[in-house]
Amino acid sequence: MAKIIRAKAAKKPSVPSVPSKTARKTAKKATARKPAEASAKPVAKRTAKPKPWTSAEVHEAFSRFRNANPEPKGELEHLNPYTLLVAVVLSAQATDAGVNRATRPMFAVADTPEKMLALGEDTVRDYIKTIGLYRNKAKNVIALSEKLIAEFGSEVPRTRAEIESLPGAGRKTANVVLNMAFGEHTMAVDTHVFRLGNRTGMAPGNNVLEVELGLEKIIPSEFMLHAHHWLILHGRYICLARKPRCDVCLINDLCRWPEKTV
């Protein structure tokens, strides 16, 4: 029987597969997203640093403060260096007016460390109970009075390190006492002075010490005795935290704050 031989079918040339409609749409979307995603990368904003104050501008600012208020006074009432020390310790996280209301009757009967110890912690606490953190502050007043008697002959010491060694007293307390009681050229930085140093651009800093040292560096010696009082009062009554009164500010033309209202 004859063998039947079939011819092999010729191979069909390979044809590239055509993507489906869904695949084409997905590819288009991916391609379209690329530039958008690239442009969506956050771009760091460069905030221009305010131009530093010149020595002439600093001198002009404090000349204006001096002309407007030649003898500024701190608003904490006190009778002597000891009562000043106690008042400043009590003023932490409290207003000067609130401290004065509490200490006025207390200082009338206890204006020395010995008299304060005679009152005792409970009585001191009763006098100052309207002040924030009064329980801990009463302990500090008694403890610092004991230390003044035991180590300093009942006198307020005249160095920053010694004052800072007293219970409840920090660098700001030491600066206030050294300035107001002993006439030292110190710069006490509270929230008002810290705000002013940064807002005006006069002495910007990330913390109170940086602002303190910055102000001491640029303020001429002739103004340093009263400088911290001028700045505190200016921050308390003019350069307010939320609604600064730029229209009546003595130094609004020198101030570097970009949001000032004049």
Image (cartoon, helix red, strand yellow):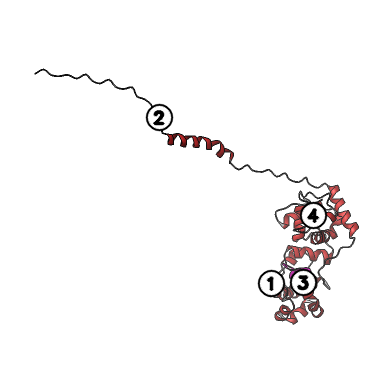
Check disc 3 and report the residue beneath it.
98
Camera-nearest residue between 35 and 132: 35
* Of callouts 2 and 3, the N-terminal one: 2
Q: Amino acid at mark 4?
A: Glu
Percent across and percent down for residue 176 are: 79, 64
Q: Nearer the viewer's eye, disc 2 or disc 1?
A: 2
For residue 79: magenta?
no
Q: CA distance from mark 1 to mark 3?
A: 13 Å
Secondary structure of the residue carrying tag 3 is helix
Q: What is the span of residues highlighted in magenta in the rendered image? A: 85-99
Q: Nearer the viewer's eye, disc 1 or disc 3?
A: 3
Q: Are marks 1 and 3 in contact (CB under 8 Å)?
A: no
Q: Are marks 4 and 1 in contact (CB under 8 Å)?
A: no
Camera-nearest residue between 30 and 48: 30
Check disc 2 and report the residue beneath it.
18
Quadrant of the image occupied by residue 41: top right
Q: Is residue 21 visible?
A: yes
Check disc 4 and report the residue beneath it.
216
For label 4, count other residues whose C-alpha is less than 10 Å away and answer few (under 14), some (14-19) or many (20+). some
Q: CA distance from mark 4 to mark 3?
A: 30 Å
Quadrant of the image occupied by residue 155: bottom right
Camera-nearest residue between 84 and 52: 52
Secondary structure of the residue carrying tag 2 is loop
Q: Amino acid at mark 3?
A: Gly
Residue visible at 70% across and 56% down?
207
Residue 26 relative to residue 197: left or right: left
Q: Nearer the viewer's eye, disc 4 or disc 3?
A: 3
Q: Nearer the viewer's eye, disc 4 or disc 2?
A: 2
Q: Main secondary structure of the magenta part?
A: helix
